């Protein structure tokens, strides 16, 4: 059973960089799948941030305007999210998730526990 | 961008009821549509993928249908643990989620 354990600071200053990690257990990130980041502002809906393949190929939500960087560390079996130039609008619960399937069968079937990140001075 | 319109935004129902939640997309996405359940303080949980395929381990009370631009999630015989917020997600062009439907006890 795949498990995703997230870690990172819960408070980031405005204009700073939000950095989160997602450690994967019960499976290798080097398999043929994509690893995703999604966020949810408090009391609101879900927003997809981006994803990374085991080869390092990435896709991002254009709304982030290149502020998001997703990377992977195969030696630690974990993925990371860095979001630069943060503002209060980036305050949200951040989730990592594994994608299974391809084309019309794509779905996010395993999720991390979520971390609330607040942007405030 | 593919826009998602999920309705209703909230819904009150009783244990044992049958409820339907709808999701409409701004363009055809064939069957690239998933449904998730989210309980307070928890991550979303996959219920249905590819519009109508039940995720392993999910109760058969949940069913999905639709293709193109119109989709439905139906919950038959509501149980107390079903009261939660439900989201649709399109996977046709990157990912977009619906606004959510909060299902409350009447």
Image (tube, grey):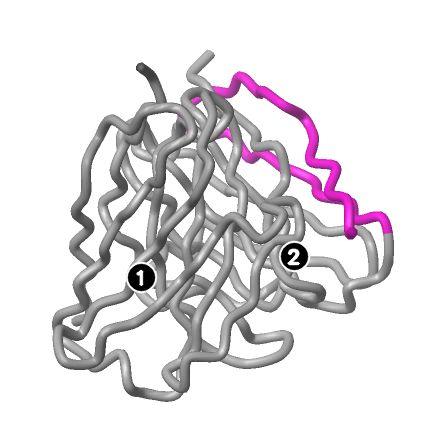
Please tell me the numbered disc located at residue B23. Answer: none
Q: Which residues are magenta?
A: B1-26
Location of the N terminus of chain A (image quadrant): bottom left
Give the residue displayed 44% in from the left and 48% down from the top.
Answer: A38
Location of the C terminus of chain A (image quadrant): top left
How far across and down, in percent of the image, does residue B5 sit?
Answer: 74, 37
How far across and down, in percent of the image, does residue A22 sit?
Answer: 23, 58
Pointer 2 and pointer 1: residues touching (CB < 8 Å)? no
How far across and down, in percent of the image, does residue A40 sit?
Answer: 44, 34
Chain to which mark 2 belongs: B
Up-down relation of residue B7 to residue A26 (above or below): above
Badge 2 and badge 1 in a common chain: no
Chain to which mark 1 belongs: A
Give the residue displayed 34% in from the left and 17% down from the top.
Answer: A120
Give the residue displayed 30% in from the left and 63% down from the top.
Answer: B57
Q: Residues within 10 Å of mark 2 (few under 14, many from 20)?
A: many
- Going by the image, does B6 lie left or right of B82? right
Residue of label 2:
B90
Give the residue displayed 72% in from the left and 51% down from the top.
Answer: B71
User: What is the quadrant of residue B43 in the picture?
Assistant: top left
Whether residue B20 is in magenta: the answer is yes
Residue of label 1:
A110
Near-viewer residue (B62 or B35): B35
User: What is the quadrant of residue B105 in the picture?
Assistant: top left
Label 2: element kind:
strand
Q: Residues within 10 Å of mark 1 (few under 14, many from 20)?
A: many
User: What is the quadrant of residue B83 in the picture?
Assistant: top left
Label 1: element kind:
strand
């Amino acid at each position: 059973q795949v498990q995703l354990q997230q870690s990172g600071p819960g408070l980031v200053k405005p204009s700073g960089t939000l950095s989160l990690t997602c450690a994967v257990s019960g499976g290798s990130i080097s398999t043929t799948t994509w690893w995703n980041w999604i966020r949810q502002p408090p009391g609101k809906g879900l927003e997809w941030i981006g994803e990374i393949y085991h080869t390092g190929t990435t896709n991002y939500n254009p709304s982030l305007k290149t502020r998001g960087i997703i990377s992977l560390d195969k030696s630690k079996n974990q993925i990371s999210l860095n979001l630069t130039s943060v503002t209060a609008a980036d305050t949200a619960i951040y989730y990592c998730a594994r994608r299974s399937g391809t084309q019309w069968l794509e779905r996010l079937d395993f999720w991390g526990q979520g971390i609330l990140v607040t942007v405030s001075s | 961008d593919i826009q998602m319109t999920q309705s209703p935004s909230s819904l009150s129902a009783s244990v044992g009821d049958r409820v339907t939640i709808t999701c409409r997309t701004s363009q055809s996405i064939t069957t690239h549509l998933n449904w998730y359940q989210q309980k307070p303080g928890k991550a979303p949980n996959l219920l249905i993928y590819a519009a109508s395929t039940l995720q392993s381990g999910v109760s058969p009370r949940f069913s999905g249908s639709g293709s193109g631009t119109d989709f439905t999630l139906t919950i038959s015989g509501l149980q107390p643990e079903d009261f939660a917020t439900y989201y649709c997600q399109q996977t046709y062009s990157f990912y977009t989620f619906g606004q959510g439907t909060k299902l409350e006890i009447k």
